[in-house]
Structure formats: structure tokens, C-alpha cells
Amino acid sequence: MAPAIPSAMDRPHFIGIGGAGMSGIAKILAARGAQVAGSDSRESATAEALRADGVTVHIGHAAEHIAADTSCVIVSSAIREDNPELVAANERGIRLVHRSDALAALMGGLRSLAVAGTHGKTTTTSMLAVALGALDLDPSYAIGGDLDGPGSNARNGDGEIFVAEADESDRSFHKYRPEVAIILNVELDHHANYASMDEIYESFETFVGRIRKGGTLVVSADQAGARELTARVRDQGELNIVTVGESEHADVRIAKINPRGLTSEVTVVMDGKFITFAVAVPGRHYAHNAVAALAAGVALDLPVHNLASALGKYTGVKRRLQLKGEAHGVQVIDSYAHHPTEIAADLEAIRGGAGDGRILVVFQPHLFSRTQELGVEMGEALALADASLVLDVYPAREDPIEGVTSALVVDAARAKAADVTAVHDQAAIPDAVAGMAKPGDLVLTMGAGDVTDLGPHILERISLSRPES
């Protein structure tokens, strides 16, 4: 039975309720009996899914959307200070609750497992949610992406386990007290909040320090940043550290990864025993995510063979190499990859399933600050594709930075002799792709912004163009 909600959150109002993190918390609160309301900038399938759960969702932000009996206003770091609802809440003295504090409160009283890292959090959290559900453990979970439809990013289960994606971008993962934590990798990102790798390490060290006494840290043995972090926290008292990866020194060692088209088979060595299980998504990085999930589940005392089999039930999460459809022999796949490491990993993963076809990418850089710091590396990663179309930077919450444009990405890709074209009109993309694509090709829409919306339009245009086979 899930713990009762704090009285301060019995009538919450969410600013930006349609966001991946916010909507999940709203859904769980509603399931626990809170009268939830909120606002978002536009209509969406997520807003409709929340309404189906009994949540009041306003479109647009206005002070009058906050009801007279609102117990608190829940915000994320993305909400600007001049948001009219935030201004009204401050003027009326309504308690403000950060998204991370709300999630931490929901996790209280349960056996919590938090998944952190620069990349792979959503996938690994999703793998655990699906596997625990397949084992009839009825977990609660909060994920930064939808499993199988709008609103499926969160669940209020009756079981004793709560699995949560732990976001390092604004240090909000410092609020959690997990029994088990996973750290997949540690790299420099979120440049608006972190100025150096030292700050990143300090932030992850604080997160590790929040693990409950006697708890377990599952951490990569392969990735350089994770190894450095492990060395820094090795002497923390009453902490069990389990390393995972292909390194011969890993506690849970990946002995073999057999690619099988857009799936793979993984063999690990754990406590001297070989365990082989299927991973229904492509790529080495997804295999590594599955092994981290396996180790974390074992740390929660779950039977290893049952858990390994249950992990095979995971078939993907929206925007993580999600097949959007096929038209005239051309598959269109959507990828959330926006950091150079993610871009390269997804392109390498998809290469194994492309056969003799080409990989064509429609890439949208995400955030001016990230493009300023990593634009060159983004372009170099795109050189792994056969051809790329690069859109303008998606600003999200940021204002433009002088001199920072998608040209940073395009120029870097061209320096690697890549076939890359800048496209400033997003509406021109479907025609451009239809003119390039041939039967057997794979098209990836890639980025964390609204590039995801292009998939159906590309498929429609390819269908109408009837390319010769």
C-alpha cells in the first residue's frame, strides 16, 4: 500500500504539468487521492491522459488558474521567474515545492531505487519498471519518457518498490534517499548549471552520499567518469559498491554481447555463474543498461534468473530508437539523443540493423548552451551517419547566445568529410528526406526538441512519393 500523501500536497497546482517529470508526479499524486490541477503551454496527448486520470489541466499560464484552496504550487527548474502563476503564488504566499521535493516525498516509506547518469537514465528506469511489473511486484515508478503511450511515464503501484529516474541536470537528485542507486556514466553536460567536471563529480558524490546506510551503488566499470567517481566514493562507510561492465575487474562482468539485428543477447558473469538473457533493443549501450538494471534488482534481493528473464519483456520507450513506421522500404526511427556520446551510441547501434541500407539523420541541436560547448563534438558524431540534415538550435528554456547556431555542428561534420546539409525551414524536411531516401534506408529523427514531430510527416511524404524499388 502506497504511503499517504503529505497534507501540503493534497491540492497541488503544477506549472508546466505536461512535462515528462512533472506529469508523472501529478499522475501519482492523483492516484493517491490528491485533487491535482496544473497548466501547460499547449495541448498534448499527455494533457489528455492526465485529464483521464481526473487532473484539471489548463492551457496557457494565467494567475487565475491557481484555485483559492490550492495547497502548494509545484515547479521545476525550467519555470521562469516571471511566469504569471509563479508570480501569483509568491504574492499569495502559497507554498512552492520543487519537483524533486515532491518526488522525494512520494518515494518516502518505500524501497527506492534511483537511476542516475549523464545518459541512459530513462531506458534503464524503464527496463526496471517493466521487469518488476512482469514479476508481479507492482512497482511505483516515475520515468522521463513514456513506455507505451501518453501518461505511461509513471505509476502508483501497490508494491514496496519505487523506481525513479534521478536527474542531475539541476542537482535535484540530491533530494532522494535511495536504498539502491545506479550511476551509468559521468560526463560534462548541462553547461548552464555546471562549469567543470569537478563540479559534476562533486554533485554525483553528494548523490552517492544520500544512499541509505547499508545500501548499494551500482556503477559502470567501463566509463572513465564513472571509474573516477567510484575511486572518490570507495571509502564511504556502510556502502556496498557493485561495478558492472566489460572490464575484467567488474563485479558483474559482461562476457559477450551478440547483436541480432535490432535486438541483442547478453551473457554476464555474476558470482562466478554465467547468465544469458535477451535485450529487445539494439546496441551495446542498451545491453549495458540492462546489466546495470539486473545488478540493481539483485541488490534488492530479487532472484537473478527471474529478473534476467523479465528484463527481456522490455521492448523500448518512446523516443529511444522508437520505430515510427515504414513506407516503401524506408524505416523512420526516433531518437532522443542530443549529447555527442548519445548520438554516436545510437548511430553505432542502428548501424547493426541497417543491413546494406544507409543511415540518414535529421538532427536538431538542443539548447544554445549545450551547442556552444559541444557543437563540434555533435558534428563529429554525426559523421557516423551516411548523410545528415541539421536543423536550427531548439532553444527550450534558453535565450539565444550570440554566435551560437547550428553552423557549429554543420561545420564540424563537414570537417570530418561528412555529407551534411543545414536546413533552416523545418517544414522542408519531409520533402528533403523523401528525395534522399531509398528502400532499405533507415531515417533517424534525432534530438530532444520538437524534431520528434517530423516522423509521421516524413513517412507520409515518402508514401506519396512512391520511390522506385
Image (cartoon, rainbow, N blue to C red):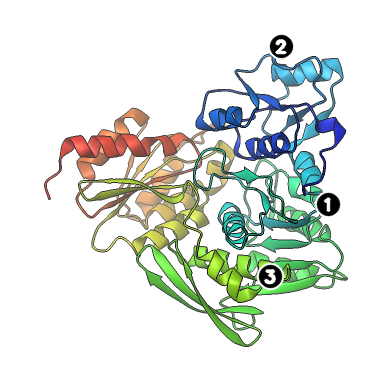
Q: Residues within 10 Å of mark 2 (few under 14, many from 20)?
A: few
Identity, as a three-letter code, of the amino acid under mark 3: Leu
Q: Which residue is mark 3?
A: 302
Q: Which residue is mark 1?
A: 109
Q: Is residue 251 found left or right of 178 in the rendered image?
A: left
Q: Nearer the viewer, mark 3 or mark 2?
A: 3
Say which of 343 and 466 sits in front. Answer: 466
Identity, as a three-letter code, of the amino acid under mark 2: Glu
Residue 397 appears in the rendering: no
Q: Which residue is mark 2?
A: 64
In the rendered image, the vertical position of residue 157 relative to residue 243, given as above or below: above
Chain-order first, disc 2 or disc 1: 2
Say which of 163 and 361 sits in front. Answer: 163
| Residue 339 place in picture, x, y as percent | 53, 50
Q: Secondary structure at mark 2?
A: helix
How many angstroms separate mark 3 from mark 2 (CA)?
Answer: 49 Å
Residue furthest toward the left? 468
How many angstroms separate mark 3 from mark 1 (CA)?
Answer: 19 Å
How many angstroms separate mark 2 from mark 1 (CA)?
Answer: 35 Å
In the rendered image, the vertical position of residue 384 relative to residue 22, given as above or below: below
Q: Residues within 10 Å of mark 3 (few under 14, many from 20)?
A: some
